[in-house]
Amino acid sequence: MREEIIWELRSDKVKELAKNGERFDGRKAGEYREISITTNISQNAHGSCRVRIGKTDVITGVKLDVAAPYPDSPDEGSISVGVELMPMASPVFEPGPPREDAIELARLCPR
């Protein structure tokens, strides 16, 4: 609840700044945050990368496996998506089983 109230307070400020061609973090409207991409960061994945955009840090990995298709769709493959929202990313994320928002984010990924 507290996070929602804080967001509402900030959203008014962000909208006001946008009208003036400014941003919440002081950048100009067309000014990008620093972007860096590092590939092959995990030895446990078939492909992986770390993307940093300003202070936002995202790590992703891809693993592949060959398996028998489901009996009801013998000519199709399948994709399984998992999402982990780490506690160090935000105080609202907690360790343990995936929360509803992580499950929903995985469901929204294209299949």
Image: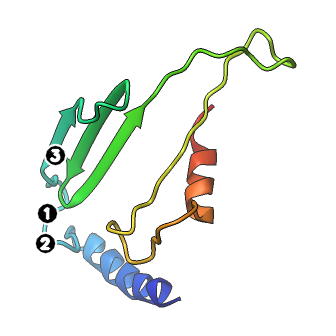
Check disc 2 and give the amino acid type.
Answer: Gly
Residue at horizontal 74 percent and vertical 16 percent from the top: 69
Q: How many marks?
A: 3
- Crowd rating for badge 3 (residues with CA inside 10 Å; few <14, some 14–19, many 20+): few
- Rounded to the nearest angstrom, the CA distance separating label 3 from label 1 is 16 Å
SS at mark 2 in the image: loop
- Which callout, 2 or 1, points to the residue nearer the camera? 2
* Figure check: 21 above or below 53: below
Task: Say the numbered circle drawn on residue 35.
Answer: 3
Task: Say the numbered circle drawn on residue 105.
Answer: none
Residues at badges 2 and 1 in contact (C-beta under 8 Å)?
A: no
Check disc 3 and give the amino acid type.
Answer: Ile
- Rounded to the nearest angstrom, the CA distance separating label 2 from label 3 is 17 Å
Which residue is most to the top? 75
Label 2, on which residue?
Answer: 26
Residue at horizontal 44 percent and vertical 60 percent from the top: 85
- List x then y, in percent, for residue 94: 47, 72
- List x then y, in percent, for residue 56: 26, 58
SS at mark 3 in the image: strand
Q: Is residue 67 left or right of residue 40?
A: right
Q: Is residue 62 left or right of residue 108?
A: left
Q: Quadrant of the C terminus?
A: top right
Which residue is more in the foreground, 10 or 95? Answer: 95
Residue at horizontal 81 percent and vertical 17 percent from the top: 73
Check disc 1 and give the amino acid type.
Answer: Lys
Residue at horizontal 31 percent and vertical 83 percent from the top: 13
Label 1, on which residue?
Answer: 28
- List x then y, in percent, for residue 48: 32, 32
Which residue is more in the foreground, 63 or 53? Answer: 63
- List x then y, in percent, for residue 72: 87, 19
Q: Is residue 72 left or right of residue 69?
A: right
Q: First in sequence, mark 2 or 3: give its number.
A: 2
